[in-house]
Image (cartoon, rainbow, N blue to C red):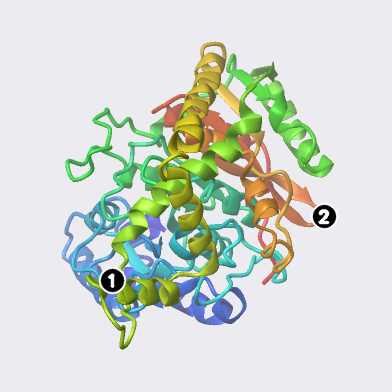
């Protein structure tokens, strides 16, 4: 697309129109978008075409369509977090990543569906619609960034942004057979990302190839003074890092990630991927991350605690939907929150408030923080011996819509292989590594903090020696 835009064999307007044409054809089945930005997107594309016609200089990704998860604020474009609470919320500023997309000349096609306030693993918790997996319309696309993954898999947009708190980029990328990257915590600014769990949330890209993912990361990565948790680190050229080979790379395979509960066909796809790395000169061996079994419990205590604090701002007073005819101020709070929040959001607020309450803080929240430290130490120890860790992204392929929605504990366990990575704050990418019963399987490649270059290099090497990323759903 870049080459065709530069050679003028394709215009930005044609590219944007093609995206909306594809959305019109597939959206009745997929339901990935909550809000479209068609008028503004076409205006932006025409302005870019005029600049190109005059021989003007443009950024590398100028004119390329992109979808944005609906918890990333966009100036003048409705941002709902897939919640009735923010049904009427139109931001008056851009998130840092939204601004960076504009500066790169990328054209925002619309806002993508998600689990409400990013709480969920299947996209069934959206207050508006259930996004469907393009590979099998009866199955979930994963969550919470299911709309982003499904839109890329369905060919509606070549790029999308999502957010990952406990696996919400990697798991839907695996389910939908696309590439999804969770960067190191702090590499990408969270300013303008509606907070779920502030110590875990991280924005990252979806694309169809590792090279495209690297291009997107190049745009959004970097220090931001508007985000106090933003890391001031040098940003390498991620695309140039893809040229290296992986000979001599040391890979650890956590035995806890290949045990009971992991579908045998998923395990076999991962083992096949390891054989590819062996053929390329990399070395791998089994490693133990002994505190993995405590990760899910620690995560849901910490994430829910932070959610209960962050979501206190939604009170029906400052913004969002307000309950009609309350008796008094307290009744306004109660009615607005009762009507505005869905069941999963309420469940996590209650759990988090309980964990933070007097008499339980030390027993639950503080202990979970200590366990988080132990989990991070597991990764530190492993990375003292290995360059990368490799594991399945999810224990199974995409499950059917409605199959787990009434069993929260079973739903939470789908993130068992992604949550420890989020607690440790390290980067990880999910790339397609095969099919199991016709459904995509994701390979999770985990790296050292701020070593996205090695993660991308390893993912790209695997991709170049396999055909999995070329498979497309038959829509």
Q: Residue furthest bottom?
A: 325
Q: Is residue 18 left or right of residue 274?
A: left
Q: Residues within 10 Å of mark 2 (few under 14, many from 20)?
A: few
Image location of residue 27, percent across then percent down: 55, 78
* Image quarter (top left, top right, bottom left or bottom right) of the N terminus: bottom left
- What's the distance in space between the residues labelled 2 and 1, CA to CA? 41 Å
Q: Which residue is mark 2?
A: 437
Q: Position of residue 409 (x, y in %)?
A: 67, 52
On the picture, is 205 further left or further right than 174? Answer: left
Q: Nearer the viewer, mark 2 or mark 1?
A: 2
Please state which of residues 115 and 157 is positioned toward the viewer in this rendering: 115
Q: Which residue is mark 1?
A: 45
Q: Are marks 2 and 1 in contact (CB under 8 Å)?
A: no
Toward the front, the furthest residue is 359
Q: Secondary structure at mark 2?
A: loop
Which disc, if any, is residue 164?
none
């Amino acid at each position: 697309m870049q080459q065709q835009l530069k050679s003028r064999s394709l215009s930005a307007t044609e590219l944007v129109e093609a995206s909306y044409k594809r959305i019109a054809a597939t959206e009745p089945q997929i339901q990935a978008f909550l809000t479209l930005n068609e008028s503004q997107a076409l205006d932006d594309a025409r302005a870019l075409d005029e600049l190109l016609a005059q021989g003007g200089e443009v950024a590398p990704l100028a004119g390329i369509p992109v979808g944005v998860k609906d918890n990333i604020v966009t100036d003048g474009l409705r941002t709902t977090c897939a919640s009735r609470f923010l049904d009427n919320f139109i931001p008056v500023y851009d998130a840092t990543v939204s601004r960076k997309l504009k500066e790169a000349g990328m054209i925002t096609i619309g806002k993508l569906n998600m689990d409400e306030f990013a709480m969920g693993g299947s996209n069934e918790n959206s207050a508006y619609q259930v996004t469907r997996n393009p590979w099998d319309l009866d199955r979930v696309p994963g969550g919470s960034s299911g709309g982003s993954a499904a839109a890329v898999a369905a060919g509606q947009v070549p790029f999308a942004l999502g957010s990952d708190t406990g696996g919400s980029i990697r798991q839907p990328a695996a389910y939908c057979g696309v590439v999804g990257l969770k960067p190191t915590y702090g590499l990408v600014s969270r300013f303008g990302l509606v907070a779920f769990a502030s110590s875990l949330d991280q924005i990252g890209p979806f694309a169809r190839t590792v090279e495209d993912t690297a291009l997107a990361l190049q745009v959004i990565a970097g220090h931001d003074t508007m985000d106090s948790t933003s890391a001031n680190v040098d940003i390498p050229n991620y695309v140039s890092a893809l040229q290296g080979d992986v000979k001599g790379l040391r890979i650890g395979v956590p035995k806890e990630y290949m045990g009971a509960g992991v579908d045998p066909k998923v395990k076999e796809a991962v083992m096949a991927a390891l054989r590819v790395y062996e053929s390329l000169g990399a070395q791998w061996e089994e490693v133990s991350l002994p505190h993995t079994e405590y990760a899910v419990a620690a995560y849901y205590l910490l994430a829910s605690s932070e959610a209960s604090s962050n979501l206190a701002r939604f009170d029906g007073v400052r913004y969002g939907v307000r309950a009609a005819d309350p008796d008094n101020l307290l009744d306004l709070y109660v009615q607005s929150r009762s009507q505005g929040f869905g069941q999963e959001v309420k469940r996590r607020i209650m759990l988090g408030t309980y964990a933070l309450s007097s008499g339980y803080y030390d027993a639950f929240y503080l202990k979970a923080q200590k366990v988080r430290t132990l989990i991070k130490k597991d990764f530190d120890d492993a990375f003292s011996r290995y360059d990368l860790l490799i594991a399945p992204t999810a224990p199974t392929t995409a499950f059917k819509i409605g199959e787990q929605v009434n069993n929260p504990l079973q739903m939470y366990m789908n993130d068992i292989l992604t949550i420890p990575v989020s607690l440790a704050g390290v980067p990880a990418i999910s790339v397609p590594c095969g099919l199991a019963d016709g459904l995509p399987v994701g390979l999770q490649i985990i790296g050292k903090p701020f070593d996205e270059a090695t993660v991308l290099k390893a993912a790209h090497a695997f991709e170049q020696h396999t055909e999995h990323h070329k498979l497309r759903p038959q829509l």
